[in-house]
Amino acid sequence: MLNKIKLWKSSQKTLTLNDRVEQVQKLPIPNHIAIIMDGNGRWAKKRALPRIAGHHEGMRVVRKITMLANKLNVDTLTLYAFSTENWKRPKHEVDYLMGLPEEFLGNFLPELIDENVKVCMIGNDNRIPDRTKRAVEKAIVETSSNTGLKLNFALNYGGRAEIIEAVKKISNDVKNEKLQLVDIDDECFSKYLMTHHLPDPDLLIRTSGELRISNFMLWQIAYSELWFTDVLWPDFTEMHLLEAVEAYQRRSRRFGGIHSEESKK
Ligand code: V0D
């Protein structure tokens, strides 16, 4: 008996990534996973490195997590890469961050194309430097006909600003008699958001121990499962993503099919 327990324990530990992927694929996979990638600066500080070293390391993790999400047949992976608050950081850090999309795509766009990943972006591009916009735009165009994972970067994104923009567009449509007040409901409102083309997140992950939403997808996460971890984003591995998905699967199984308010509709 003791031997059996030992055997079981060791087999649990030695489950390879692929075994665990196979296990996870037997149960429903969240359609849309959104991640607040926090803790890059803290990761660097712990190593007496400049903050930008943490951001750079975080980019490596983006690639790995993207590939796993694609393998799991996730429909959409949204990554909160830059918030409207991040402009308050020192200029050299903002400049460095704005170089990352170009560097990332310079290295990985061929792989994203190969893997059938479709790059998308949400957020306001008014303050994004031209070379950053051009790099992202090129990736969006070159992956536009891909049918695999939608890799959606939230850049200069803020949830309240998004809602205010939607209200303005709706008011304008009402004024111009394109829309009637009685027709404004959840579904109609969603069509005016930047995420109109995406499903709502089923699972929201935030790394680095903060238990806040920080103005991310305020409308869209109404029914999302939330998963917080102390792990810093540069330390986040494929195993951590699987852990979050497994937690999601346990929760939805416990609710036995009628798990979300959403599905009662
Ligand atoms: C820093 C950790 C990839 C979080 C990841 C401009 C913060 C690394 C991108 C990226 C950032 C964005 C768009 C795109 C392709 C890649 C990125 C920013 C920061 C902010 F089309 N990583 N990454 N963008 N970090």
Image (cartoon, grey):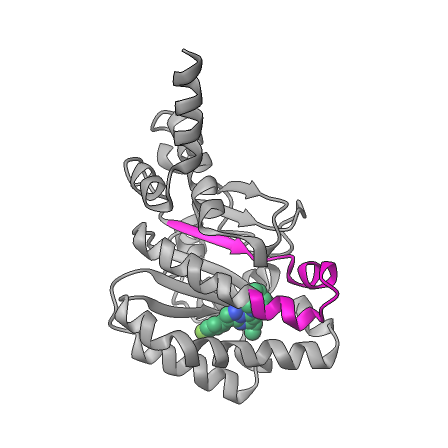
Question: What is the span of residues highlighted in magenta in the rendered image?
Answer: 32-57
Where residue 106 sits: x, y (%)? Answer: 43, 81
User: To which quarter of the image does residue 242 belong?
Assistant: top left
Q: From the image, which quarter does the N terminus lie in? A: top left
Where residue 35 sits: x, y (%)? Answer: 51, 54
Name which residue lies at 33% across and 43% down: 21
Q: Tell me if 225 is positioned left or right of 177 in this view.
A: right
Q: Tell me if 38 is positioned left or right of 68 in this view.
A: right
- Near-viewer residue (206 or 265): 206
- Near-viewer residue (34 or 14): 14
Q: From the image, which quarter does the C terminus lie in? A: top left
Q: Residue furthest front?
A: 3
With respect to residue 133, does 249 lie above or below? above
Q: In this orientation, does residue 33 appear? A: yes
Name which residue lies at 48% across and 81% down: 102
With respect to residue 235, does 265 lie above or below? above
Q: Tell me if 229 is positioned left or right of 67 in this view.
A: right
With respect to residue 43, does 139 lie above or below? below
Q: Residue furthest bottom?
A: 130
